[in-house]
């Protein structure tokens, strides 16, 4: 297959943060040059978790619009590419069921994100949370996407999607070949994991990733935070007492310092080494002030544009409806072939 298609998604679970922005959304924007891109607000994924996390029906609707606004504000082009929400295209759920019957329980048992998200109350986690990776495989493969930009945290799920694609191709090799797909129907999707910002950590704990579901709001910079909130969170970010080193080696064993330098680098579009060249020797008081200034400069326009877009929910909904229609034009014919291959 020659076509290079990108698919990726973000959950509408509220609190869109700097990790989502630098680790995912800004990369979505950059990929538009070289690929046909489909960016999905994955609302079916959102309801796999507790209702407090996704906020109930009103919370879900509003977060869906917020993620859409963030895509648009960051610079995703909804006319050249596709932005839509997952629940509007049936192919996702339908293909996920087929993949539930392709994937093995042993494969899902190895998923670390389920263990982290289910925590101690595994027996009480939803079946959907457990099956999350088969739905993610369906999201990607319903479009036969070839590339998937994700943060480090999603690497294991993408590996599983490849295994599912591979097993389907082998299990139905003959049937697919008879229908004109001698190499199997699905491509094996490749991860696109950026060198910078693949893993932005919590501002309160350098061992934990910055996350929407962290109960401490001081742990993350939300895309809706105003300049004062951003400055305060950076000022209060956990650090050690040493000044910044001038070389990368000096950041080993210093998770919090490494994270702040990494955030600076991603915002400034530099490498961490370049940041240290400029700021090596600075105290954290000085460096944090520079970081806050940069973060505010970069995020303020995104924040303002999100607010402007959110003030007109009808416009956002129209973009999602149009995106869903165009997504169906790709996914539905694929689904017809997939069902024919299976024997439905
Ligand atoms: P969360 O993990 O906060 O619930 P999602 O699962 O919706 O957010 O993730 C959306 C995208 O943002 C994914 O591509 C994910 O890899 C990326 N992402 C999430 N958290 C981070 C982080 N702390 N650093 C870098 N990328 C992240
Ligand atoms: Na995630």
Image (spheres, grey):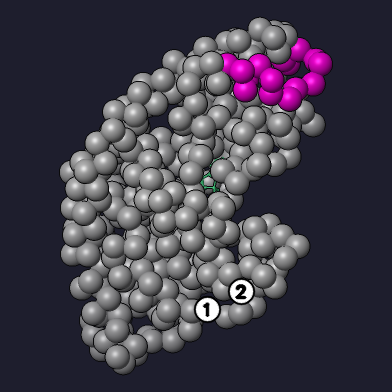
Front in this rendered view, residue 309 or 98: 309
Q: Locate residue 108: give its quadrant.
A: bottom right
Front in this rendered view, residue 274 or 109: 109
The answer to whether mark 2 is within 8 Å of ligand 2 is no
Which residue is label 2 attached to?
Answer: 107
Main structural element of the magenta stretch: helix, strand or loop? loop
Give the percent coordinates (x, y) of residue 210.
61, 39
- Does 94 appear above or below 268? below
Dot 1 surroundings within 10 Å: few (below 14), some, or many (20 or more)? many
Q: What residue is shown at x 61% (from left), y 74% (from top)? A: 107
Q: What residue is shown at x 64% (from left), y 43% (from top)? A: 214
- The number of numbered badges drawn on the structure is 2
Give the percent coordinates (x, y) of residue 232.
61, 18
In the picture, measured across the screen, residue 113 lies left or right of residue 157, that is right
Give the percent coordinates (x, y) of residue 143.
30, 64
Which residue is label 1 attached to?
Answer: 103
- Residue sticking out furthest to the bottom: 343
- Does 82 appear above or below 177? above
- Does 202 appear above or below 283? below
Whether 234 is among the magenta residues is: yes
In the picture, measured across the screen, residue 275 lies left or right of residue 192, that is right
Q: What residue is shown at x 49% (from left), y 70% (from top)? A: 134
In the rendered structure, which segment of residues is drawn in magenta?
Answer: 231-245
Front in this rendered view, residue 14 or 208: 14
Check if mark 2's residue and mark 1's residue have beta carbons within 8 Å: yes
Whether 199 is among the magenta residues is: no
In the picture, measured across the screen, residue 9 lies left or right of residue 117, that is left
Q: Does dot 2 land on a helix, a strand or a loop? A: helix
Quarter of the image for the N terminus: give it.
bottom left
């Amino acid at each position: 297959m020659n076509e290079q298609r990108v698919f990726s998604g973000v959950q509408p679970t509220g609190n869109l943060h700097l990790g989502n922005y630098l680790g995912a959304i800004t990369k979505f924007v950059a990929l538009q040059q070289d690929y046909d891109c489909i960016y999905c607000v994955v609302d079916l994924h959102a309801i796999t978790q507790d209702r407090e996390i996704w906020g109930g029906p009103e919370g879900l609707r509003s977060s869906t619009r917020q993620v859409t606004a963030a895509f648009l504000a960051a610079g995703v082009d909804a006319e050249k590419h596709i932005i839509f929400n997952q629940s509007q295209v049936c192919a996702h759920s339908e293909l996920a069921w087929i993949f539930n019957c392709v994937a093995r329980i042993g494969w899902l048992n190895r998923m670390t994100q389920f263990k982290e998200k289910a925590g101690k109350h595994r027996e009480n986690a939803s079946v959907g949370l457990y099956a999350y990776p088969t739905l993610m495989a369906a999201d990607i493969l319903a479009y036969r996407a070839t590339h998937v930009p994700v943060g480090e945290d999603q690497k294991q799920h993408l590996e599983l999607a490849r295994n599912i694609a591979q097993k389907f191709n082998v299990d139905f090799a003959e049937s697919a070949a008879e229908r004109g797909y001698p190499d199997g129907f699905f491509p094996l999707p490749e991860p696109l994991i950026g060198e910078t910002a693949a893993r932005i950590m919590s501002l309160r704990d350098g061992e934990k990733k910055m996350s929407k579901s962290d109960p401490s709001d001081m742990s993350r910079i939300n895309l809706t935070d105003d300049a004062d909130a951003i400055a305060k969170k950076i000022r209060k970010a956990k650090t050690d007492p040493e000044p910044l080193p001038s070389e990368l080696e000096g950041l080993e064993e210093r998770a919090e310092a490494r994270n702040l330098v990494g955030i600076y680098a991603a915002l400034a579009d530099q490498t961490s080494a370049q940041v240290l060249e400029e700021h090596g020797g600075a105290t954290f008081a000085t460096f944090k002030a520079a970081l806050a200034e940069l973060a505010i400069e970069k995020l303020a326009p995104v924040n303002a544009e999100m607010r402007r877009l959110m003030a007109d929910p009808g416009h956002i909904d129209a973009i999602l409806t149009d995106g869903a229609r165009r997504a169906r034009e790709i996914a539905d014919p694929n689904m017809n072939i997939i069902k024919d291959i299976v024997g439905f």
